[in-house]
Image (tube, grey):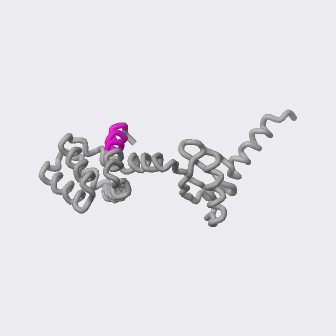
């Protein structure tokens, strides 16, 4: 995520707060981010081979039906020739939205699918560890063998079987014979 994307996301977030349209703008930014996820979209908006008229038509199509603030942002980015900001705008805006709600993103890595009770317990644990409400995403990683690896923000809590076995190996290697 670029610093420039963070700045534009912050400006968009503050304006949407003033207008009481944070949820609508967040939904539009998320849809916009999904539409720009492919390499063809990046090439179309950033390639010097694409004419300004065609680029303007694409941006108009992307902005159609979106909140006025999102449409205005598209126009500003086009005018200032900073369309590359659009590719990092979604994650930057989402981070601001979570921070405003007192939440943080987290990832729970497990070798198998987690049940509702296990996920609730992990969310509670992550909340106690971080002091914030945690929105967890579960990722299946069979190489962990067992246990869970929990990443909250940029902090990793590794309770996996693979980590436990690696620690045991280190202790055995350092033990005097």
**Closest to the observer: 174 or 66?**
66
Dominant secondary structure (helix, strand or loop) of the stretch shown in magenta: helix
Residue at 40%, 49% in the rendered image: 91
How many numbered circles does the render carry? Answer: 0
What residue is drawn where x is 14% and y is 48%? 52
* Residue 59 shown in magenta: no
**Residue stretch in magenta:** 3-11
- Residue farthest left in this picture: 53
Residue 41, picture quadrant: bottom left
Residue projecting furthest to the bottom: 115
**x, y percent for residue 114:** 63, 63
User: Residue at the spot x=28%, y=44% of the render?
Assistant: 84
Q: Position of residue 117 (x, y in %)?
A: 66, 64
Q: Quadrant of the C terminus?
A: top right
Q: Nearer the viewer, residue 125 or 80?
A: 125
| Residue 38 visible in the displayed image | no
Pick whichever, 54 or 48, lies toward us.
Answer: 54
The answer to if 5 sits in the magenta stretch is yes
Which quarter shows the N terminus?
Answer: top left
* Picture coordinates of residue 154, whole percent (x, y): 54, 42
**Residue 77: percent from the left, percent from the top?**
23, 44
Query: Is residue 132 depicted above or below 62 in this figure?
Result: above
**Quadrant of the rendered structure where residue 108 is?**
bottom right
- Asked if 177 appears above or below 69 in the picture, the reply is above
Q: Is residue 17 left or right of residue 159?
A: left
Residue drawn at (62%, 66%), measured in percent from left and top?
116
**44 in relation to 168, above or below:** below
The answer to whether one can see residue 166 in this image is yes
């Amino acid at each position: 995520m670029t610093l420039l994307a963070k700045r534009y996301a912050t400006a968009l977030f503050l304006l949407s707060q003033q207008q009481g349209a944070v949820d609508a703008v967040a939904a539009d930014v998320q849809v916009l981010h999904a539409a720009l996820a492919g390499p063809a979209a990046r090439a179309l908006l950033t390639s010097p081979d694409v004419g300004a008229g065609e680029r303007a038509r694409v941006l108009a199509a992307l902005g159609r039906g979106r909140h006025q603030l999102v449409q205005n942002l598209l126009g500003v980015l086009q005018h200032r020739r900073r369309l590359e900001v659009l590719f990092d705008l979604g994650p930057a805006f989402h981070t601001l939205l979570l921070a405003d709600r007192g939440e943080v993103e987290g990832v729970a890595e497990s070798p198998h699918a987690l049940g509702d009770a296990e996920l609730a317990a992990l969310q509670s644990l992550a909340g106690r560890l971080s002091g914030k409400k945690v929105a967890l995403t579960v990722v299946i990683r069979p190489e962990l063998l067992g246990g869970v690896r929990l990443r909250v923000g940029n902090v990793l809590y590794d309770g996996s079987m693979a980590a436990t076995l690696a620690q045991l190996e280190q202790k055995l290697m350092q033990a005097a014979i």
